[in-house]
Amino acid sequence: MNPKRFLLPVFAILLIGAATVTTLAAASAQPGRGATAAAPKKRPAVAKLRKERRRHVNPAVVRRFRSAAWRWQALMGVRPAKSYASLHSPRALRYWSGQARRMSRLAAHPPHKRAWLCIHRFEGGWNDSGDPYWGGLQMDRGFMSTYAPASLLRRGWANRWTPLEQMWVAERAHRSGRGYSPWPNTAHYCGLL
């Protein structure tokens, strides 16, 4: 049997079938959409939402990111972020993990970090626990209770705080209008007064 004789009718049948399908599609197309559209396409946002609904997110992980973001925001004196997405959704996971990452990056760089490190160099160790003054910036009880009451209740005296927490509390005092006056000698040595 000659293969050309066999393939020619098969090719003709396929060609006729394809022409029939395109004719039917053009006839059933909605007016105003054009004759080339065979069927309405799914919008990508709808498909993405359906995919998100199927993916399971552990709400405990989202809560952990949310509390980390809120902790950094409270430390920096920034208003806490809000999200109305369900804690079970991937959208909430993306939002809160991004917030936690962004806030930790911002908290790592206090506005006057170089000044606080200079004052710390002349004052004491970050975990200094001498009675009238605590921490690397030598904060007294009144200073801590005024500018960091939540940290004082949660973590104790400044010698138990991280260096970043101590710097942000000092930054809070600086922003309140006190400037570097709580550290008159060391601020003078650093050229800040």
Image (cartoon, grey):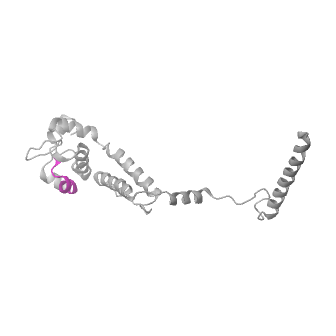
Residue at (13, 54) in percent of width and height: 142
Frontmost residue, 102 versus 50 = 50
Q: Residue furthest front?
A: 1
Image height check: is 106 above or below 148? above
User: Which corner quadrant holds the C terminus?
Assistant: top left
Examine the structure image and report whether residue 188 is included in the region drawn in magenta.
Answer: no
Q: Is residue 164 left or right of residue 79?
A: left
Q: Residue furthest left?
A: 131
Residue 77 visible, this angle: no
Image height check: is 146 above or below 183? below
Residue at (54, 59) in percent of width and height: 49
Frontmost residue, 121 versus 156 = 156
Residue 167 visible, this angle: yes
Q: Magenta region, mostly helix, strand or loop?
A: helix
Q: Is residue 20 left or right of residue 190?
A: right
Where is residue 50 shown, x and y percent of the image?
55, 60
Residue at (13, 49) in percent of width and height: 140
Where is residue 83 shown, x and y percent of the image?
42, 60
Frontmost residue, 130 versus 91 = 91
Where is residue 23 shown, x and y percent of the image?
84, 59
Give the number of marks: 0
Q: Quadrant of residue 167?
A: top left
Image height check: is 184 above or below 141? above
Q: Quadrant of residue 80?
A: bottom left
**Residue range highlighted in magenta:** 147-158
Where is residue 5 shown, x and y percent of the image?
92, 43
User: Which corner quadrant holds the N terminus?
Assistant: top right
